[in-house]
Amino acid sequence: MHEITDLLKAWSSGDTQALEKLVPLVDDELRKIAHNYMRNERSGHILQTTALVNEALIKLIRENISWENRKQFYALVAKRMRQVLVDYARRTQRADYVDVDEAVIPDETPKEVLLLDEALTKLAGIDERKETIVECRYFIGLTLAEIAELLGVGQSTVEREWRFARSWLKREMTE
């Protein structure tokens, strides 16, 4: 685990070889996160797990991030994956024609993705920690204990904020 953190810090310092060494070490975890996102998408979605991982990594590579540790890395990758899916949903929703290469079965899922993104963005504006808890729990698949460790708070705090966030999101998305 220290190797991942060391490579992240080296990458932050501009070592491009660190990124090449990092990717194989984090690939399984990134696929797990992507799989958690994709299991919530409709079947026949044009994006596959590998494509979602790649798109998220491309977004991160373009940013200049000062990496602290692997948990921060996984949390930011999860946010970028969500952004990829939201961008895809927006493109799907506003498409005036269907390109053969992008043919998908019409579904309400893009609207749901956009609603969830709007609600999570709004929640982040109110309480960023609650939004982080939702992302870590729902999209990354961390346990409440793992989230508590990541955030440096007690598990009971995470449990309480998780319950609140779920309830708040449900109300926000159904209004």
Image (cartoon, rainbow, N blue to C red):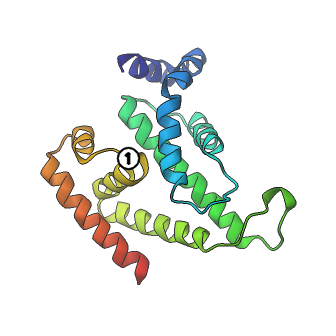
Of the 4 image quadrants, the one containing the N terminus is top left
Check disc 1 and report the residue beneath it. 141
Q: Name the residue at 42% across, 21% down.
A: 4
The image shows residue 69 at horizontal and vertical percentages of 36, 28
Q: Name the residue at 29% across, 53% down.
A: 129
Q: Is 134 placed left or right of 94 in the picture?
A: left
Relative vertical location of residue 77 with respect to residue 100 in this rendering, above or below: above
Task: Determine the residue located farthest toward the front in the rendered image.
Answer: 43
Q: Amino acid at mark 1?
A: Gly
Q: Is 155 placed left or right of 66 in the picture?
A: left
Relative vertical location of residue 149 with respect to residue 16 in this rendering, above or below: below
The image shows residue 119 at horizontal and vertical percentages of 42, 69
The image shows residue 121 at horizontal and vertical percentages of 43, 63
Q: Is 15 placed left or right of 175 in the picture?
A: right
In-front residue for pair 150/128: 150
Residue 66, quarter of picture: top left
The image shows residue 89 at horizontal and vertical percentages of 63, 64
Relative vertical location of residue 26 with respect to residue 105 in this rendering, above or below: above
Task: Determine the residue located farthest toward the right in the rendered image.
Answer: 100
Of the 4 image quadrants, the one containing the C terminus is bottom left
